[in-house]
């Protein structure tokens, strides 16, 4: 009781101590991680109420990296991360839609797809991945391991595989159900099918004369900021920002050998050839580790398929080396180590047998007594067989086979195995005549940038950055210093600068920088370049502003073309009565083309000429139309013929075309954007990965 009284008497003090400790913990965590309490926590991205957890994201990235590695693909890690994140966001949106629609996969549907009458797809997948006959066998092996003599650990791995497979198949079935519903929302009616038929059925043949805007000097047509702003306001929704963006300029300096490095590399190659010729085998390269040697044996037939190598070998005697090729900074040298006459190609029959030595010998005897190969191959004792398999005896991959069949008579089956159980049966069915075989040392060398070159490239760029500390100076002074700047828009969802791999750190810097700042140098010899970035502008919300350099220059060009069109139309209006007359006034020639309302490009005129297409569709036969503005000039035309000899109207065929061009099939390509709707994605990837 006394102890309790003491605790009660000190309760206020205890609360103060605990509160101070808790506050210290919160402040400490805030300053160390910046991602908890008031930060992003473990949420790497958020869309609506849906969150992507960083731990699940990391697991998926690891899986994707392993899959890319298994394919031998080299993928930028930041690009891979963004691809995975986009995929996970799409999955969240899809799952949300599935839940709202109440779509489910029943146990019966899943069972039919996994091991029932619809299991063909899963069977093929299991056969390829596990090598078992079908999915039902894989399931039985996973949950009845003792029946197959499997260890429990193996069974658990197989069970995990099966559960993962079930989830994948369930998602596939849900997608099928959703797509079936989605397809039903955009079905062509009678008016749609007839309209799309009419658009593609009629082809108008036109005569035209055209005056290009490029023939008028830009300097004579002043464009004001008001002109540009009017165009921008008229189509402002085209520039809606999905997320905050940064406008940057960047300089990329490729780390490549200097002229001195190239000359030094050439001297090394010359010295290597001298050393190879002065020493046996490849001993002359023992002190030259940058030269990579690959010994190989190659037949005359394959030599003949490589003209450069053939030309080199035609001049070589055994023990001599020569330069075969130079491609950029890559050199290839060949040294002829030996030349011989050998059998290269043979054909063999072989069988692998699961049985006793006596059973193997019995099968050998049967084959040599004339029993058909296919008949023996069908025996339950035979696990694998192949007839007339071509083998190259000079290929090191077939060295074990060469050892087995060396000296064996053609046409006689034999077994090289003496074990009591299991064995192999071989027969040499055909041997070709001996051919010339060359033994070569293929030597490769690449001129790399020296440390001095790398240091010079980096120090020169650093001097430039030190002298140009604002974004304006960074861009304005580049050309004089021998650099080129490139503009780019980046956001939290941009994995790299432009198309340059290993530049995510520059993007992360730009997303945290202040307007006008210039970055340090990013990159190294591993990435193959040095990169520096200047932050020109910040677009935080709403719309990409008209001051954006790319938008501004595009709208300025259009406004200037509009002014050119006004002048040209005023100059030509009513000055001729036919196409030939207008062509003479315009100082151009008469040309012909065809216009179909279903096409995207008019031959001779260009892409997206919607105004011209509309005018052609409404023109009467032989009516003179224009002068009118097109995308890149002023045109006068006349429809001379309308060809309606297309395929006869077929509602079903037109419905399919509607689906492909304007219906569900076309919209499925944009399904992610449709499901996203007006929701914004909050991408926190740069808070976790700099």
Image: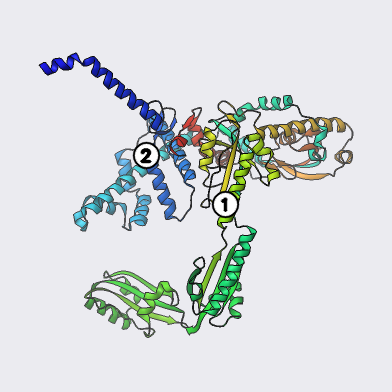
Residue sitting nearer the eye, 174 or 639? 174
Q: Quadrant of the N terminus?
A: top left
Where residue 109 appears, as percent x and y from the top left, is 33, 41
Q: Quadrant of residue 539?
A: top right
Q: Residue placed at 42% from the left, 73% from the top?
A: 396
Q: Nearer the viewer, residue 650 or 259?
A: 259
Vertical placement of residue 372 versus 90, above or below: below
Q: What x and y, as percent, mark residue 533?
A: 59, 39
Count the numbered circles shown. Answer: 2
Question: Which numbered disc, 1 or 2, marks the residue that appears first in the sequence?
Answer: 2
**Label 1 crowd bin: few (<14), some (14–19), many (20+), radius 10 Å:** few
Q: Where in the figure is residue 357, as x and y percent of width and height? A: 23, 77
Task: Tell me if I can see residue 78 in this picture.
Answer: yes
Which element type, helix, strand or loop, lies under badge 1?
helix
Q: Name the residue beneath numbered marker 2.
A: 56
Checking the image for residue 646, the label placed there is none
Image quadrant assignment for residue 191: top right
What residue lies at 54% left-to-right and 82% top-to-bottom?
318
- Residue 133: name its quadrant: bottom left
Q: Is residue 434 visible?
A: no
Residue drawn at the location 42% of the way across and 39% of the way down: 175
In the foreground, 109 or 57? 57
**Does 325 sit above or below residue 439?**
above
Which residue is under mark 1? 455
Compared to residue 614, the image places residue 499 above or below, namely below
Q: Residue at x 69, y 25 (%)?
A: 229
Residue 174 placed where, x, y %?
39, 38
The alpha-carbon separation of the residues under discs 1 and 2 comes to 41 Å
- 529 sits left or right of 398 in the view: right
Element under disc 2? helix
Decide: few, some or many residues near mark 2? Use Cα within 10 Å; few <14, some 14-19, many ≥20.
Answer: few
Residue furthest to the left: 1
């Amino acid at each position: 009781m006394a102890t309790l009284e003491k605790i009660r008497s000190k309760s206020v003090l205890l609360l103060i101590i605990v509160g101070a400790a808790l506050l210290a913990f919160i402040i400490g965590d805030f300053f160390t991680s910046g991602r908890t309490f008031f930060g992003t926590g473990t949420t790497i991205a958020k869309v609506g109420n849906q969150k992507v957890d960083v731990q699940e994201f990391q697991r998926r990235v690891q899986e994707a990296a392993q899959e890319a590695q298994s394919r031998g693909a080299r993928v930028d890690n930041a690009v891979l991360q963004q691809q995975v994140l986009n995929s996970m966001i799409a999955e969240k949106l899809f799952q949300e839609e599935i839940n709202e629609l109440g779509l489910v996969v029943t146990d019966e549907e899943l069972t039919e797809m996994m091991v029932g009458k619809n299991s063909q797809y899963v069977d093929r997948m299991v056969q390829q991945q596990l090598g078992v006959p079908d999915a039902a066998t894989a399931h039985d092996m996973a949950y009845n391991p003792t029946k197959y003599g499997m260890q429990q650990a193996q069974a658990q791995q197989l069970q995990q595989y099966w559960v993962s497979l079930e989830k994948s198949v369930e998602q596939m079935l849900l997608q099928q159900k959703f797509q079936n519903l989605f397809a039903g929302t955009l079905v062509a009616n009678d008016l749609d099918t007839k309209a799309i038929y009419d658009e593609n059925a009629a082809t108008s043949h036109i005569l035209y004369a055209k005056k290009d805007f490029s023939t008028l000097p830009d300097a004579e047509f002043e464009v004001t900021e008001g002109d540009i702003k009017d165009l921008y306001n008229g189509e402002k929704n085209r520039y809606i920002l999905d997320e905050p963006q940064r406008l940057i300029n960047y300089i990329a300096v490729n780390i490549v050998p200097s002229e001195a490095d190239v000359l030094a590399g050439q001297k090394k190659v010359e010295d290597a050839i001298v050393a190879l010729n002065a020493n046996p085998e490849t001993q002359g390269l023992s002190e030259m580790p940058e030269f990579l040697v690959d010994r190989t044996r190659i037949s005359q037939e394959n030599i003949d398929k490589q003209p450069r190598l053939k030309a080199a070998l035609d001049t070589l005697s055994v023990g001599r080396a020569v330069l075969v090729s130079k491609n950029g900074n890559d050199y290839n040298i060949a040294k002829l180590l030996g030349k011989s006459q050998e059998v290269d190609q043979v054909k063999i029959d072989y069988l692998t047998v699961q049985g006793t030595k006596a059973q193997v010998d019995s099968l050998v005897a049967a084959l040599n007594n004339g029993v058909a190969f296919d008949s023996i191959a069908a025996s339950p004792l035979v696990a694998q067989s192949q007839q007339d398999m071509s083998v190259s005896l000079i290929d090191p991959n077939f060295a074990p086979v060469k050892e087995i069949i060396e000296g064996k008579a053609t046409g006689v089956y034999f077994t090289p195995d003496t074990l009591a159980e299991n064995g192999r049966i071989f027969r040499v069915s055909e041997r070709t005549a001996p051919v010339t075989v060359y033994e070569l040392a293929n030597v490769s060398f690449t001129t790399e940038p020296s440390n001095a070159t790398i240091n010079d490239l980096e120090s020169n760029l650093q001097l430039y950055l030190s002298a140009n500390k604002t974004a304006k100076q960074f861009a304005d002074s580049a050309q004089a210093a021998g650099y080129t700047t490139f503009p780019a828009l980046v956001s939290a969802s941009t994995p790299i600068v432009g198309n340059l791999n290993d530049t995510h750190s520059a993007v992360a810097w730009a997303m945290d920088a202040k307007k006008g700042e210039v970055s340090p140098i990013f990159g190294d010899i591993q990435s193959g370049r040095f990169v520096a970035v200047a932050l020109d502008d910040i677009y935080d919300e709403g719309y990409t502003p008209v001051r954006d350099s790319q938008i501004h220059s595009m709208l300025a060009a259009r406004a200037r073309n509009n002014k050119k069109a006004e002048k040209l139309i005023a100059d030509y209006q009513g000055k001729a009565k036919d196409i030939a007359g207008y062509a003479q006034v315009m100082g151009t020639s008469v040309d012909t083309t065809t216009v179909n309302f279903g096409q995207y490009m008019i031959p001779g005129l260009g892409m997206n000429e919607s105004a011209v297409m509309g005018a052609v569709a409404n023109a009467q036969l032989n009516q003179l139309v224009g002068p009118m503005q097109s995308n890149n000039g002023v045109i006068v035309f006349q429809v001379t013929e309308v060809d309606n000899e297309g395929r006869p109207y077929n509602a079903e065929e037109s419905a399919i075309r509607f689906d492909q061009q304007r219906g569900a099939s076309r919209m499925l390509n944009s399904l992610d954007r449709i499901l996203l709707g007006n929701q914004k994605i909050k991408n926190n990837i740069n808070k976790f990965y700099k």
